[in-house]
Image: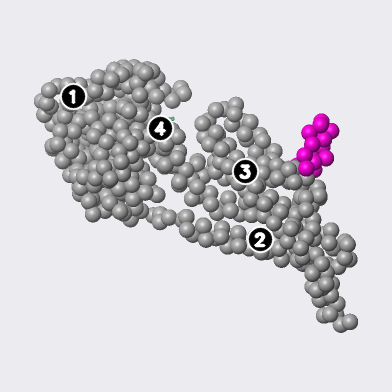
């Protein structure tokens, strides 16, 4: 066998691909499902925390900052392992799926809270004052004047962060979540062939490349004319 | 003395005090502005002029004293501050237009969300207000597409559309290139002629001479003296006023 044939046989072996494609496809859809749940819950929670923080209640803000910093400092895998292997010791049990979802949701919430908060702060004080001086309330000002401006500022960093964290769904493979990487490594050890890993890589590309492109599009779409 | 109508007091400030931490910025200010009056406030930078205006719609919370607008105690617990604020127009040095909305959007926001006007009615009112400031043709322009003078006129229209009882101007022309100042002052002159009650912090002396009923000189958190423009500018009674007036006349 030539070197080229050996390469094809190890990485793109037709038989192995045919045998394990269905399980990779299953993993693909599970990953999409998990990623969507993380993005929805993480960004919603992050925005909610940033809004609470804007109320400027000192004790609550200290608490938010503490947890946000904690979650940003810990490697996500450590959090997943604590939830999955640690919490059962105090009789809190969750599946690997839930442990992965919860961990990454919290991490995304922490990062997006910081991003939203920075966006809210970046809106000039004069915008609040102009709006309040015409009789709009605090929440109305936030909703119609401040957030539309803040969110435009947050789109680029938020997109990047969201992509980075949803790729972390691969960590679920460690706690037996049957997502792409888990399916691929299982298939790889059964078949003794690297083709499933290539399939997994392709699945990730199919999943995330459009998201990266979409992020770029949103970025230009949301950048409004400024002086 | 004043070109006022019925002498009804529109704004009454009594013994107003405001501190930022240890810094006392307003040290007991008394000011009355009657219906249709145009009062000019001058004074050195840091003397508390902006703080005084900002207390008058509670963008700053006074530390002491009372403020009444059209007979309503602005600082009372049961006063609906948002309802009061829409009757107190405020124009800022830095315009503060909403950059993500067109000129018309800037004007209609409060009409729709505070006064709950239907869209068509709000847009009709906004159209009128923009026409009053000479910008009927700019209603679909974003702030970034307007000159500073045009932006400030949109900001005036935004306040005017809410039919305020009194308008507060905080250095409305000092961020503008000289050639754009006239357009804003013309709008203010029209408003005065239409009978608007106005308090204007500004150093536009010529405009003050031509249009102000009264000029108030503030220094270090107190009103040092006040009177008709010809009196304050030509024959001030206090040394500090004299020094300040000759200082700004040199520029
Ligand atoms: N939010 C604030 N916090 C602390 N100090 C302030 C604040 N706003 C104004 N000051 C201070 O109050 C004084 C008066 O300010 P201001 O009313 O803006 O004066 P003016 O408009 O006459 O220039 C200044 O010394 C200023 O630094
Ligand atoms: Mg000022």
CA–CA distance in space, label 2 to label 1: 68 Å
Q: Secondary structure at mark 4?
A: loop
Q: Residue furthest bottom?
A: A2
Q: Of the numbered discs in the image, which one, if any, rests on residue B34?
A: 1
> In terms of sequence position, does the residue under pointer 2 or pointer 4 come before the other?
4
Residue A82 shown in magenta: yes
The residue beneath circle 3 is A41
Q: Residue at x 71, y 54 (%)?
A: A30
The residue beneath circle 4 is A137
Residue A3 shown in magenta: no
The crowding category of the residue bearing disc 1, from other C-alpha atoms within 10 Å (few below 14, some 14 to 19, many at least 20), is many
User: Within the image, what quadrant is residue A203 found in?
Assistant: bottom right
CA–CA distance in space, label 4 to label 1: 28 Å
Discs 3 and 1 share one subunit? no
Please give left or right for residue B54 compared with residue A124 in the image. left
Question: Can the viewer see residue B48 in this picture?
Answer: no
Marks 3,1: beta carbons within 8 A? no
Q: Nearer the viewer, residue B210 or B68?
A: B68
Q: Kindly identify which chain the residue marked by label 2 belongs to.
A: A
> In terms of sequence position, does the residue under pointer 4 or pointer 3 come before the other?
3
Magenta-drawn segment: A78-95
């Amino acid at each position: 066998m030539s070197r080229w044939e050996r390469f094809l046989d190890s990485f793109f072996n037709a038989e192995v691909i045919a045998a394990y494609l269905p399980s990779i496809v299953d993993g693909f859809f599970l990953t999409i499902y998990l990623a969507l749940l993380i993005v929805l819950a993480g960004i919603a929670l992050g925005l909610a925390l940033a809004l609470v923080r804007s109320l400027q209640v000192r004790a609550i803000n200290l608490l938010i900052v503490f947890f946000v910093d904690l979650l940003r400092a810990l490697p996500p895998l450590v959090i997943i392992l604590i939830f999955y292997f640690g919490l059962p010791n105090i009789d809190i049990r969750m599946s690997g799926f839930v442990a992965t979802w919860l961990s990454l949701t919290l991490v995304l919430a922490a990062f997006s809270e910081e991003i939203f908060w920075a966006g809210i702060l970046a809106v000039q004080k004069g915008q609040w004052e102009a709006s309040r001086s015409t009789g709009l309330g605090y929440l109305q000002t936030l909703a119609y004047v401040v957030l539309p401006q803040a969110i435009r500022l947050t789109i680029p960093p938020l997109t990047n962060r969201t992509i980075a964290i949803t790729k972390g769904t691969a960590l679920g493979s460690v706690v037996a979540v049957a997502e792409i990487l888990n399916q691929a490594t299982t298939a790889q050890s059964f078949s003794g062939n690297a083709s499933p890993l290539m399939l997994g890589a392709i699945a990730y590309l199919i999943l995330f490349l459009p998201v990266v492109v979409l992020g770029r599009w949103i970025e230009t779409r949301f950048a409004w004319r400024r002086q | 003395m004043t070109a006022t109508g019925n002498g009804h007091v529109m704004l009454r400030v009594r013994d107003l005090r405001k501190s930022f931490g240890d810094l006392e910025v307003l040290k007991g200010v008394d000011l009355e502005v009657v219906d249709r009056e145009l009062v000019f406030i001058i004074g050195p930078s840091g003397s508390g002029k902006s703080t005084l205006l900002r207390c008058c719609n509670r963008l700053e919370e006074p530390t002491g004293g009372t403020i009444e607008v059209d007979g309503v105690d602005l600082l009372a617990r049961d006063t609906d501050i948002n309802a009061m604020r829409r009757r107190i127009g405020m124009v800022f040095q830095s315009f503060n237009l909403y950059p993500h909305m067109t000129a018309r959007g800037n004007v209609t926001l409060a009409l729709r969300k505070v006064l709950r006007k239907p869209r068509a009615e709000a847009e009709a009112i906004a159209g009128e207000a923009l026409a009053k400031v000479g910008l009927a043709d700019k209603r679909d322009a974003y702030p970034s597409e307007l000159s500073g003078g045009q932006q400030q006129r949109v900001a005036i229209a935004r306040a005017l559309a809410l039919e305020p009882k009194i308008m507060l101007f905080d250095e409305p022309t000092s961020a503008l290139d000289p050639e754009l100042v006239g357009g804003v002052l013309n709008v203010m002159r029209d408003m005065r002629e239409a009978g608007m009650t106005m308090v204007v912090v500004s150093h536009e002396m010529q405009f003050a001479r031509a249009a102000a009923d009264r000029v108030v000189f503030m220094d270090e958190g107190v009103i040092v003296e006040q009177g008709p423009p010809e009196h304050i500018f030509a024959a001030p009674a206090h040394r500090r006023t004299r020094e300040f007036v000759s200082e700004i006349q040199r520029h």
